[in-house]
Image (cartoon, rainbow, N blue to C red):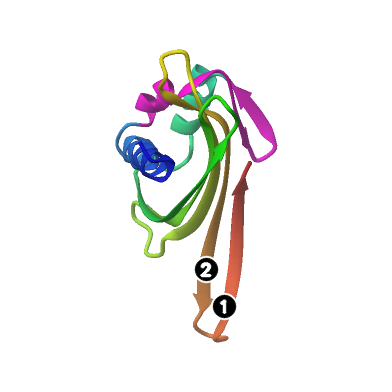
Amino acid sequence: MDPDQLAKAFVEHYYSTFDANRAGLVSLYQDESMLTFEGQKTQGSQNIVAKLTSLPFQQCQHGITTVDCQPSGPAGGMLVFVSGNLQLAGEQHALKFSQGLVALLGESRALFIFLNSSTFLLLQVNHYQRRPRFFAFVIF
């Protein structure tokens, strides 16, 4: 399969699972996988999923805008960069997000996430001053 098609299919699966059932992401991480969130490092599939399921928002919908892929290493891994919108339940404005993933082939030849880094941006317009105000939320 073409690496770009594989990356797109992987990203679609990841975000549809994240939006519907975050606990289902456990199979996409392994013991050596790492997530850094607000300076706190989390390692291992169970710990990462526990962190993701404890986020303050329970319902969300990702809208993917771009998926860029760069093959990485001789073992079939890839560096994937994703950007798009994140709509939280009950919120009027969507967050802009970008996420970088290092995906590697596991022993079963299925991709898993080795490193995970995300940035969320919210653009809020102050209607009284007519100037945009930017808020940034960063997950490494």
Q: Secondary structure at mark 1?
A: strand
Q: Are marks 1 and 2 in contact (CB under 8 Å)?
A: yes
Residue most toward the right? 39
- Position of residue 102 relative to residue 89, above or below, is above
Observer-nearest of 11 and 75? 75
Check disc 2 and report the residue beneath it.
123
Q: Give residue 63's position: percent from left, percent from top.
A: 36, 54
Measured Cα–Cα span from mark 1 to mark 2: 7 Å
Q: Which residues are magenta?
A: 22-43
Q: Is residue 126 magenta?
A: no
**N-term-proximal mark, 1 vs 2:** 2
- The residue type indicated by label 1 comes to Pro
- The residue type indicated by label 2 comes to Leu
Q: Secondary structure at mark 2?
A: strand
Q: Give residue 59's position: percent from left, percent from top.
A: 34, 43
Q: Is residue 63 left or right of residue 114?
A: left
Q: Is residue 4 left or right of residue 43?
A: left
Q: Answer with the quarter of the image where residue 73 lies.
A: top right
Q: Which mark is residue 132?
A: 1
At 51% from the left and 76% from the top, the residue drawn is: 125
Observer-nearest of 7 and 91? 7
